[in-house]
Image: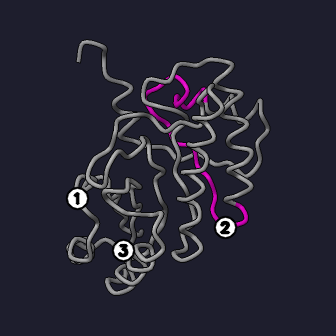
């Protein structure tokens, strides 16, 4: 079994070669890099090339990228403004898709197999308009990802639209091919907590 680590554990820090060295020394063979620009500047080719070199130097495999969940305000912090493929407002949805295409395009210089993606924000409620927006977004993103050799995997979250049953029904009803699931055990355990906890 391959030991993998999500860099979300270190998301408040820049993903530097020294940190990758510590991860490799701890016995991990592969990574899922969480994409926030303050952690990994995925939109700059020189940063992507430097990351490819650092991963190779530490014999670490990039297994997946986790899509950003919010818009970055500055180089050192996130805005907290959700980045959502479920946006009903077309302009904001197109902005989100453009940002996700930048993440997918990392594969041009740093190959990886899967892009892990949330269906909307953490408080996303099930709404037919949001469902249609997600369908439209995913149609475009799946095609873009396919050309890059990347598979999009929607991940279960605590929101209504991220519930595993909702995701299954979404795929069954939309018949989107090329879309996969990523089951996050941590999210699932949080969802099972009683409301008072």
Mark 2 or 3, nearer chain start: 3
The CA distance from mark 3 to mark 1 is: 20 Å
Quadrant position of the N terminus in the picture: bottom left
User: How many numbered marks, from 0 up?
Assistant: 3
Q: Residue at x 31, y 22 (%)?
A: 193
Callouts 2 and 3 close, C-beta under 8 Å:
no
Q: Which of the 4 quarters of the picture holds residue 71?
A: top left
Q: Is residue 8 magenta?
A: no
Identify the residue at image location x=23%, y=18%: 197
| Mark 1 Cα-neighbour bin, 10 Å: few <14, some 14–19, many ≥20 | some
Tag on residue 29?
Answer: 3
- Magenta stretch bounds: 146-166
**Side (left or right) of 5 relative to 196:** right
**What residue is drawn where x is 35% and y is 35%?**
80
Q: Residue at x 59, y 45 (%)?
A: 181
Mark 3 residue element:
loop
Residue 150 inside the magenta-drawn segment: yes
Please name whichever residue, 70 or 191, is drawn nearer the observer in this view of the structure: 70
- Tell me if mark 3 has few (under 14), some (14-19) or many (20+) residues whose alpha carbon lies within 10 angstroms of its own: many
Which element type, helix, strand or loop, lies under badge 2? helix
Q: Mark 3 or mark 1, which has the lower sequence index?
A: 1
Callout 1 secondary element: loop
Q: Mark 2 or 3, which is nearer the eye? A: 2
Query: Residue 45 appears at what percent x and percent y?
Result: 48, 74
Label annotation for residue 13: 1
Frontmost residue, 95 versus 68: 95
Q: Which residue is mark 2?
A: 148
Q: Position of residue 151 (x, y in %)?
A: 64, 58
Q: CA distance from mark 1 to mark 2?
A: 28 Å
> Is residue 126 shown left or right of residue 21?
right
């Amino acid at each position: 079994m391959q030991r993998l680590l999500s860099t979300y554990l270190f998301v408040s820090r820049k993903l530097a070669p020294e940190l990758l060295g510590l991860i490799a020394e701890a016995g991990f063979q592969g990574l899922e890099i969480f994409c926030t620009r303050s952690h990994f500047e995925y939109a700059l080719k020189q940063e992507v090339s430097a990351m490819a070199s650092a991963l190779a130097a530490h014999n670490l495999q990039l297994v997946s990228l986790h899509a950003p969940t919010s818009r970055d305000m500055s180089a050192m912090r996130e805005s907290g403004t959700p980045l959502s493929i479920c946006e009903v407002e077309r302009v904001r949805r197109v902005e989100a898709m453009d940002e996700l295409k930048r993440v997918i395009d990392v594969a041009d210089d740093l190959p990886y197999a899967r892009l892990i993606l949330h269906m909307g924000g953490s408080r996303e409620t099930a709404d037919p308009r949001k469902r249609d927006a997600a369908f439209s977004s995913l149609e475009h993103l799946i095609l873009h990802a396919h050309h890059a050799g990347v598979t999009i995997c929607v991940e279960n979250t605590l929101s209504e639209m991220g519930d595993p049953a909702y995701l299954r029904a979404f795929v069954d009803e939309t018949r989107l091919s090329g879309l996969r699931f990523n089951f996050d055990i941590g999210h699932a355990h949080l969802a099972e907590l009683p409301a008072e906890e």
